[in-house]
Amino acid sequence: MMRAVRFHRFGGPEVLQVERVPKPTVTPGHALVDVVAAGVNFADTERRRGLYLAAEPLPAITGFEGAGVVSAVGSTFDAAWVGKRVAFVSPASTADCCLVHVSRLIHLPDTLSMVEGAAFPVQGLSAWHVLHTMASVRAGETVCVTAAAGGVGQAAIQLARAAGATVIGIVSSEAKRKVALERGAHEVFVGFTAEALISRVDVLLDSVGRDAFEFGFQVLKPYGRWVCFGDASGPAPAFPSQRLLERSLKVCGWWLRTPMAPDVWAHGVSAVVDALVQKKVVIDVHPSPMSGLADVHRALESRASMGKHVVQVG
């Protein structure tokens, strides 16, 4: 048996419970990881509320990423992984043990702690892929990052600067404005005030959704790229084709769970891990015990949260 944070019904943070459940059985192509730390994302709150992956059965163990040590491997898995420190992307990560597919294991360098390892897989890789795989950002361009003080936002600011871009952040408070500036944004605005940004932006990274919809049409230059990868304020309206055509805008979506070519995945992993090791990207991590996860969900849903939340498991 093992400990895990589960929910048996959709609802508020109070439905999260630390329970004793059976350990996963190792299957071919997978590794069993003894989890030391698990990352927490806004998507976890949407899953708990039934707004994300709602068709998947309950009860469910929360979490989509973590870090730990490989304790066992399946029959088709390289046994050399046993005993290795890893970060990973996999459902049901907020537990003593997690079953992880071989394609989503990441070697964790000794220079990064387990808490740091649990902090980057979802948000760090999302930030890299929305910038590079989807937007193909180029040096000299202007990138606007919504929710710039959040986990993805802070990583995106630093990765965009490393790519030679000018970075503009959008936040919801003066305290968050200060954080985004500390992470390297050239300018930061509180709220979706477009007057100073009309037609200045080459790439808009949007994790907010509905509240950023009109803003995006105002700030993007002709031929601008709009990458949608979240809807923290609610789903955006349908994009009217005529408004896209008028300025030749490109709109695309991003989801880390979408299958991708192994070389694309590996490129993102290598780039993000190297950036962390070289301190080109610094993650603002807030650790919590498993028993405090409900309070972390409340903070994320209130949109008062900044940086990255991580649950300490082992």
Image (cartoon, grey):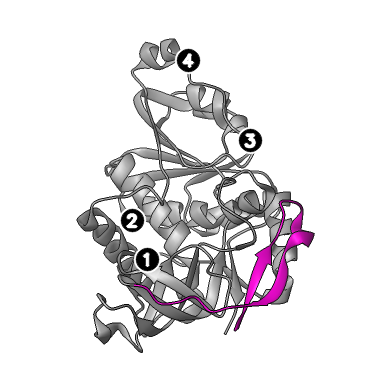
Q: Rounded to the nearest whole Å, what is the CA distance between mark 3 and mark 2? A: 31 Å
Q: Mark 1 points at which residue?
A: 280
x%, y% of residue 52?
Answer: 58, 46
**For the residue marked with disc 1, what is the amino acid?**
Lys
Q: Name the residue under label 4.
A: 240
Closest to the observer, 198 or 23:
23
Q: Which residue is drawn at 42% across and 78% down?
A: 32
x%, y% of residue 1?
Answer: 59, 84
Q: Name the residue under label 2.
A: 162
Which type of secondary structure does the marked residue at label 3 adopt? loop
Which range of residues does the magenta coloring cover? 1-27
Depicted 149 relative to depicted 146: above or below: below
Q: Disc 2 vs disc 4: Cβ atoms closer than 8 Å? A: no
x%, y% of residue 61?
Answer: 60, 65
Q: Which residue is drawn at 65% across and 70% down?
A: 5
Quadrant of residue 170 in the image? top right
Q: Rounded to the nearest whole Å, what is the CA distance between mark 1 and mark 3? A: 32 Å
**For the residue marked with disc 4, what is the amino acid?**
Pro
Marked residue nearer the N-terminal end (2 or 4): 2
Q: Name the residue under label 3.
A: 234
